Amino acid sequence: MSQVVLVTGATSGFGKATASMFAKDGYKVIATGRRQERLDELKSELKGCDVHTVILDVRDKDAVFSAIENLPQEYKEIDILVNNAGLALGLENAPEAHLEDWEVMIDTNIKGLLYVTKAVLPIMTKRKSGYIFNLGSIAGNWPYQGGNVYGSTKSFVQQFSFNLRNDLRGTNIRVTNIEPGFAKTEFSNVRFKGDDAKADAIYEGMEPLVGDDIANLIFTLSKLPQHVNVNSLEVMPTAQSWAGLFIERD
């Protein structure tokens, strides 16, 4: 029987690439997202694959639990959860940042991830098997100017992933925090609120990660033997490294 994979935020970027990779390999894929037209496009692109789409905003707690509860029978036994839905908004320093942007990032990157995980955990713990992938970021490990709340949400994702591993001892459920660096998806377009020129300028003169790179990592890790758990995986494009410490001089 084919395993069932649930991917949140499957309408673009890492999520779309991950959903596509699993679907093309014969998995049953539940793809969620906020945009019906994007989900329809995905299903059309994956014609012939076993894909079930669900309109879902992970910030809506009741909608999340209802969606998991009301999955068709053949998709109820979720084997792999990919908590991909997330975003960054703005790159202003904290004094100039918009409080509303901070709240949306917290509601999506933290609370949304918690809602989906909490809804799926009973399925996995009852069966004593499963794999949870959380999409963190190098921003959760390394601060950068303007990363304030976004980076903080990803630090939460990392620590939650580690603590979840502890809580799930004896269940055979694996948990991995994937921590990508510079990647070209719709991430920057969302961060800069549709300013495509500003978003494109971020990637000039270098080769960033792309959706398939992260999807391939998730897919590969999912194939490791049951007794192997990669706790966290930080990945950057070769062109990216650490900036070093900043020293303010007179």
Image (spheres, rainbow, N blue to C red):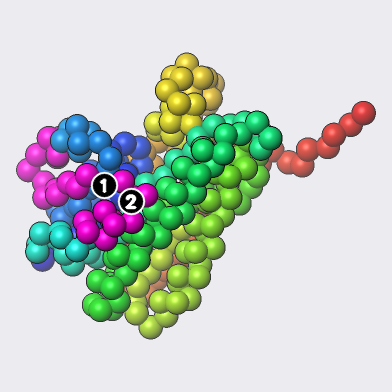
Is residue 28 positioned above or below 168 on the image? above
Q: Which residue, as the protein is rendered here, is positioned at the far left?
A: 48
Say whether residue 59 is magenta.
Answer: yes
The location of residue 141, given as percent across then percent down, is 61, 51
The location of residue 46, given as percent across then percent down, is 14, 40
Residue 224 visible in the shown view: no
Q: Which residue, as the protein is rendered here, is positioned at the far right?
A: 250
Say whether residue 163 is magenta.
Answer: no
Is residue 218 positioned above or below 190 on the image? below
Answer whether labels 2 and 1 touch (C-beta < 8 Å). Answer: yes
The residue under the point 49% across, 26% down is 192
Q: Mark 2 = which residue?
A: 60
Quarter location, residue 126 = bottom left
The residue under the point 49% across, 57% down is 157
Which is more foreground, mark 2 or mark 1?
A: 2
Residue 229 visible in the shown view: yes
Q: Mark 1 = which residue?
A: 56
Q: Which residue, as the protein is rendered here, is positioned at the far bottom?
A: 170
The span shown in magenta is 42-67
Please tell me whether mark 2 sits on a helix, a strand or a loop: loop
The residue under the point 27% across, 43% down is 33
The location of residue 17, given as percent across then percent down, is 29, 41
